Image: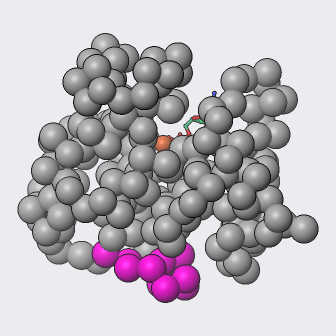
């Protein structure tokens, strides 16, 4: 475990306290679960475990932020206007990173980028981004149909795990007649070849 996170100038204890104040208990447990899975994947796939730890802990920090705050941040930072057509599911990562910059002074671009795309993926993903994306899906608290298979794939190959998760996500969203964020399709197209 890491005692101090220079990227946010906080001890682990102070960071956890901040997170516990920002999200409900079940989500706080999820953050710890994603951290644990991300550290394990990072060690396996040659990614910096410290960055994986911090990205895992922070990734859903903005999940309980209200819509007005996100809409104001989209204006304040002059972000892609299309974001306003989406909701918290997309905003807590893509817009959330701007609040994390403000609230934590976080400037580590690799961590910010990984958190930015943790929900939707992307055609280009760093090792850290892949680790966070997969860890979010397979952490020990997850119990949806298919998670056991996803964990097995993640134990074999990181790119295959990204592909598997994205395939299942597109399938899940389409099954429920939900709109699919374009970047989700970009991730699907870029990674699906790994499953062939
Ligand atoms: P969580 O924050 O740990 O719950 O997980 P994620 O950040 O990965 O996903 C948050 C929510 O966004 C989940 O309910 C996903 O199903 C949903 N989601 C992910 N991608 C898309 C998308 O392209 N379109 C829509 N409408 N929802 C999505
Ligand atoms: Fe999330
Ligand atoms: Fe999450």
Which quadrant of the figure has residue 147? bottom right
- Residue 147 left/right relative to 75: right
Depth check: give the residue in front, 107 or 17.
107
Depth check: give the residue in front, 66 or 94.
94
- Residue 62 left/right relative to 140: left
> Is 91 above or below relative to 148?
above
Residue located 71% across and 58% down the image: 190
Image coordinates of residue 43 in percent, x first then y, are: 47, 84
Image coordinates of residue 44 in percent, x first then y, are: 55, 85
Image coordinates of residue 29 in percent, x first then y, are: 41, 50
Please identify the quadrant where the C terminus is shown.
bottom right
Residue located 43% across and 21% down the image: 81
Residue located 61% across and 41% down the image: 183
Inspect the magenta stretch and tell me whether residue 21 lies in it.
Answer: no
Please identify the quadrant where the N terminus is shown.
bottom left
Q: Which colour scheme is used?
A: one colour
Which quadrant of the figure has residue 106? bottom left
Q: Can residue 57 be seen here?
A: no
Residue located 22% across and 24% down the image: 76
- Residue 24 left/right relative to 161: left
Q: Give the range drawn in magenta.
A: 41-50
């Amino acid at each position: 475990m890491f005692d101090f996170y220079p990227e946010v100038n906080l001890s682990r204890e102070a960071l956890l306290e901040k997170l516990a104040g920002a999200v409900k208990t079940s989500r706080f447990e999820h953050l710890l679960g994603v951290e644990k899975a991300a550290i394990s994947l990072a060690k396996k796939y040659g990614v910096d475990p410290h960055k994986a730890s911090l990205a895992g802990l922070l990734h859903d920090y903005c999940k309980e932020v209200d819509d007005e705050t996100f809409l104001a941040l989209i204006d304040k930072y002059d972000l892609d206007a299309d974001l306003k057509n989406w909701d918290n599911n997309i905003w807590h990562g893509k817009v959330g990173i701007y609040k994390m910059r403000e609230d934590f002074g976080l400037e580590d671009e690799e961590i910010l980028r990984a958190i930015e795309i943790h929900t939707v993926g992307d055609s280009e993903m760093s090792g850290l981004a892949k680790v966070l994306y997969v860890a979010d899906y397979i952490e020990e608290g997850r119990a949806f149909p298919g998670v056991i298979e996803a964990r097995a794939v993640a134990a074999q190959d990181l790119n295959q795990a990204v592909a598997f998760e994205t395939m299942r996500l597109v399938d899940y969203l389409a099954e429920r007649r939900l709109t699919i964020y374009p970047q989700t399709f970009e991730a699907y197209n870029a990674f699906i070849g790994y499953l062939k």
